[in-house]
C-alpha cells in the first residue's frame, strides 16, 4: 500500500490468515478505500475475493493474480461506466474469503434439553459433538452473515450455528427415537441423518456442513443407572446356559465321589449332556453390502444441465450461479434490489419470527417441532 497526494491508493492486495480461524477479512479494514485501477490482486488457492462498489457485490475472483481494470470487471461495467483513465482510483472494498475447511468446531447443549422417553417419561439429556464447515458461496455468506464487519472468524458465528444444530438434534430425536434404551450403536446413523437435515440450514448462509459427529449423549445419573441395569438384563439368556453347564459339571464331580448312588446320578447326567450342548444357538451371519462411491456432479439449479464447476452462468438457460441474495422460499438467486422473487413471488422482506412455546415461553427456531426447554410438541 502506497500513499499519494489526495488519499491512500491500494496497489498490491493480498491477505494471509495468521490465526487459522478467520473466514472473511475486508481490505481496507476501515471503511472503503481508494483502489487504484490497475492494482494487482493476488488470491490463493484456498481463497476467493469479492469486490464491492457503492455497497454492491460487483464480481468474485478465484485463485490467481488479477489486474483490476475495467476490462477485467465485467459485472461492474454493467452497473457503472467508469469515466476516468486507467490510473484513476476506484473507491471500493474487497472482501477476502477463506475457502478452506474449518474442522474440530464443537457443538453441545449449553443447558439440558427435554426429551420424552417412551419408558422413562420426560427426562433431560445433554449432547456434544464436533462439526466441520466450509464457505462455498462467498457473496451469499458476506451478504447474509458478515454484513459490513471488517472481519469474521469461527468464534463469531459458532454461537448461532450451535443453536441451529441443537434445535435440529432435538427435533430429530423426538421424531425418530422412542427410548434411550435404543440409543447404543446408533451414533453414526444419528450423525448422518442430522447432517442431511442441517444441509439446507447451512446452505442458506453460503456454508457447507461437510462433517458432523455426535460424541456423547448423556442422560442424568439415575437414568444412566437404569440403562446399565437394562443392559445387564439382556445377558440373562447367556448366563442361564452358563449356569446349566456349571451345575451339570458340579453334579458330575459330586457323582464321582458318592459310590453307587453317585454312579447312577453320573449316568443320568451323562445322558443329559448332549441335550445341554445342543441348546447352544448359532449366530447367523448377514452379508455386508458395499456402497458404491458416488460421483459429485455440478448441475444448474434451474435446468439441471451439467456445467463446469467454475462457471458463473449456465450456458443453456443463463442462470447466474454466483449467489448474491437467495430467496428463503424457493432458493432462487435474486438481484440485489429485488422486492419479490421472480420464481415463487415471495417478498424478500419476509422474515420468519421465532416460535414461542405456549407452556414455558421459550423462543425456538421458526420451524422447530419440539421445544428445546420443556420438550412440548409445538403447533405448526
Image (cartoon, rainbow, N blue to C red):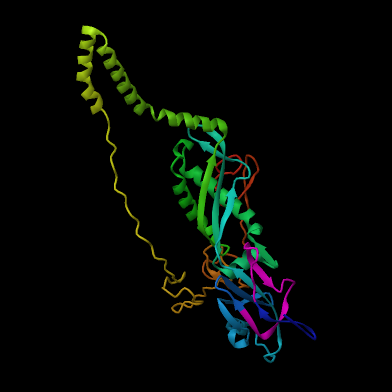
Q: Quadrant of residue 69?
A: bottom right
Q: Is residue 366 visible?
A: no
Q: Residue at x 23, y 22 (%)?
A: 273
Question: Can you give x and y, in whole percent of width and height, for residue 270 in the image?
Answer: 21, 19
Given residues 158 and 206, the one toward you in this image is 158
Q: Does 95 appear above or below 374?
A: below
In which quadrant of the rendered image does the N terminus lie? bottom right
Given residues 276 and 300, the one toward you in this image is 276
The residue stretch that appears in magenta:
14-41
Q: Is residue 39 left or right of residue 219?
A: right
Q: Is residue 283 left or right of residue 20?
A: left
Circle count: 0
Q: Is residue 232 visible?
A: yes
Q: Residue at x 58, y 84 (%)?
A: 74
Q: Residue at x 75, y 71 (%)?
A: 30
Q: Residue at x 25, y 24 (%)?
A: 276
Question: Can you give x and y, in whole percent of width and height, for residue 136 in the image?
Answer: 54, 67
Question: Can you give x and y, in whole percent of width and height, for residue 106 in the image?
Answer: 58, 52
Given residues 282 and 361, the one toward you in this image is 282
Q: Does 310 appear above or below 193?
A: below
Question: Can you give x and y, in whole percent of width and height, for residue 346 in the image?
Answer: 57, 64
Q: Is residue 224 left or right of residue 299?
A: right
Is 20 one of the magenta-colored residues?
yes
The residue positioned farthest toward the bottom in the image shown = 85
Is 163 one of the magenta-colored residues?
no
Q: Quadrant of residue 56?
A: bottom right
Amino acid at each position: 500500500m502506497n500513499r499519494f497526494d489526495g488519499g491512500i491508493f491500494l496497489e498490491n492486495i493480498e491477505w494471509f490468515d495468521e490465526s487459522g480461524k478467520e473466514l472473511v477479512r475486508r481490505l481496507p479494514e476501515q471503511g472503503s478505500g481508494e483502489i487504484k485501477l490497475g492494482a494487482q490482486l493476488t488470491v490463493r488457492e484456498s481463497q476467493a475475493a469479492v469486490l464491492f462498489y457503492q455497497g454492491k457485490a460487483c464480481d468474485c475472483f478465484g485463485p490467481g493474480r488479477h489486474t483490476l481494470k475495467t476490462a477485467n470487471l465485467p459485472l461492474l461495467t454493467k452497473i457503472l461506466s467508469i469515466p476516468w483513465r486507467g490510473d484513476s482510483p476506484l473507491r471500493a472494498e474487497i472482501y477476502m474469503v477463506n475457502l478452506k475447511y474449518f474442522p474440530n468446531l464443537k457443538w453441545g447443549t449449553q443447558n439440558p434439553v427435554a426429551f420424552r422417553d417412551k419408558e422413562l417419561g420426560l427426562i433431560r439429556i445433554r449432547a456434544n459433538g464436533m462439526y466441520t464447515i466450509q464457505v462455498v458461496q462467498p457473496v451469499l455468506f458476506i451478504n447474509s452473515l458478515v454484513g459490513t464487519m471488517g472481519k469474521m472468524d469461527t468464534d463469531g458465528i459458532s454461537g448461532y450455528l450451535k443453536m441451529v444444530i441443537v434445535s435440529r438434534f432435538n427435533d430429530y430425536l423426538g421424531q425418530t427415537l422412542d427410548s434411550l434404551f435404543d440409543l447404543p450403536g446408533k451414533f453414526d446413523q444419528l450423525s448422518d441423518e442430522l447432517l442431511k437435515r442441517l444441509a439446507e440450514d447451512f446452505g442458506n448462509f453460503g456454508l457447507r456442513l461437510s462433517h458432523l459427529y455426535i460424541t456423547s449423549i448423556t442422560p442424568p445419573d439415575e437414568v444412566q443407572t437404569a440403562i446399565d441395569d437394562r443392559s445387564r438384563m439382556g445377558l440373562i439368556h447367556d448366563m442361564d446356559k452358563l449356569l446349566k453347564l456349571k451345575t451339570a459339571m458340579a453334579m458330575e464331580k459330586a457323582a464321582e465321589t458318592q459310590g453307587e448312588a453317585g454312579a447312577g446320578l453320573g449316568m443320568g447326567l451323562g445322558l443329559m449332556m448332549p441335550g445341554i450342548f445342543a441348546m447352544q444357538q448359532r449366530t447367523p451371519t448377514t452379508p455386508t453390502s458395499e456402497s458404491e462411491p458416488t460421483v459429485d456432479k455440478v448441475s444448474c439449479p434451474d435446468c439441471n444441465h451439467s456445467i463446469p464447476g467454475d462457471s458463473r452462468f449456465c450456458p443453456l438457460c443463463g442462470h447466474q450461479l454466483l449467489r448474491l441474495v437467495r430467496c428463503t422460499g424457493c432458493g432462487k438467486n435474486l438481484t440485489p434490489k429485488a422486492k419479490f422473487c421472480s420464481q415463487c413471488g415471495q417478498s424478500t422482506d419476509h422474515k420468519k419470527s421465532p416460535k414461542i412455546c405456549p407452556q414455558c415461553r421459550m423462543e425456538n427456531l421458526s420451524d422447530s417441532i419440539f421445544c428445546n426447554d420443556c420438550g412440548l410438541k409445538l403447533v405448526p
